[in-house]
Image (cartoon, rainbow, N blue to C red):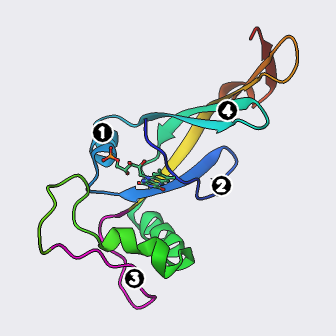
Amino acid sequence: MRTLVFRGWADVGVLDLLTDGRSAKAAELRQQPAVELCWLLPKARCQFRLRGQLLALPAGVDQQERQRHWQNLKPSGRALWGWPEPGAPLAAAADFPTELNDEVPLPEQFQLLRIALEQVELLELRDHPHQRRRWRRAVGWSEERLNP
Ligand SMILES: Cc1cc2nc3c(=O)[nH]c(=O)nc-3n(C[C@H](O)[C@H](O)[C@H](O)COP(=O)(O)O)c2cc1C
């Protein structure tokens, strides 16, 4: 389980995440594209489980969309992609920039993870009994009520 920032909707049921292509998760996703994302909203006492597949984007679209996300990030938000390989042993002389400005070219390791969702499940603990609902792409995202 890893925490990733939600970077927005690309289309209906398609969402974007950003990561470092050198990270373990990126390697795992190259082996198999299935993902399950969890959004926990503790104050609202509810949980979303979003299940889908990592999309293999055409090279041109991938480049364009990576560039768009890169430009939208603040220099401080970009900085992580200027750091040495995640998870590798820390070197004494390693450089960890605090900012990467607009002139820095798009780093190769700046990876867009575009996920096409197949189903979304919502569990709400607020009322008795708890409410559990599911929406599936295969049935046109119609709402299905389930036992909690
Ligand atoms: C609040 C928070 C937000 C994070 N956002 C991201 C993110 O957007 N993208 C990302 O790759 N890692 C993000 N991370 C770090 C990952 O959870 C993970 O620790 C890191 O990417 C290394 O994962 P891996 O080496 O197992 O692949 C975030 C961590 C925290 C605590």
Separation (CA) of disc 1 from disc 4: 23 Å
Residue beneath disc 4: 48
**In-front residue for pair 14/91:** 91
- The residue furthest right is 127
Kind of residue at disc 2 = Trp
Q: Mark 3 or mark 2, which is nearer to you?
A: 3
Q: Earlier in the sequence, mark 1 or mark 4?
A: 1
Q: Position of residue 52 (x, y in %)?
A: 53, 35
Res. 8 image quadrant: bottom right
Q: Earlier in the sequence, mark 3 or mark 4?
A: 4
The local crowd at label 2, few if under 14, some if 14 to 19, many if 20 or more residues have their Cα within 10 Å, is: few
Residue at 42% across, 70% down: 63
Q: Earlier in the sequence, mark 1 or mark 3?
A: 1
Whether residue 113 is situated above or below residue 60 in the rendered picture? above
SS of the residue under disc 1: helix
130 to the left or right of 63: right
> Would you say residue 99 sits in the magenta stretch?
yes
Residue beneath disc 3: 100
Span highlighted in magenta in the image: 94-110
Kind of residue at disc 4 = Phe
Separation (CA) of disc 3 from disc 2: 25 Å
Kind of residue at disc 1 = Glu
15 to the left or right of 83: right
- CB of residue at label 4: within 8 Å of ligand 1? no
Q: Mark 1 or mark 3, which is nearer to you?
A: 3
* Quadrant in the picture for the N terminus: top left
Separation (CA) of disc 1 from disc 3: 27 Å
Q: Mark 1 or mark 4, which is nearer to you?
A: 4
The local crowd at label 3, few if under 14, some if 14 to 19, many if 20 or more residues have their Cα within 10 Å, is: some
Residue beneath disc 1: 28
Whether residue 53 is situated above or below residue 85 in the rendered picture? above
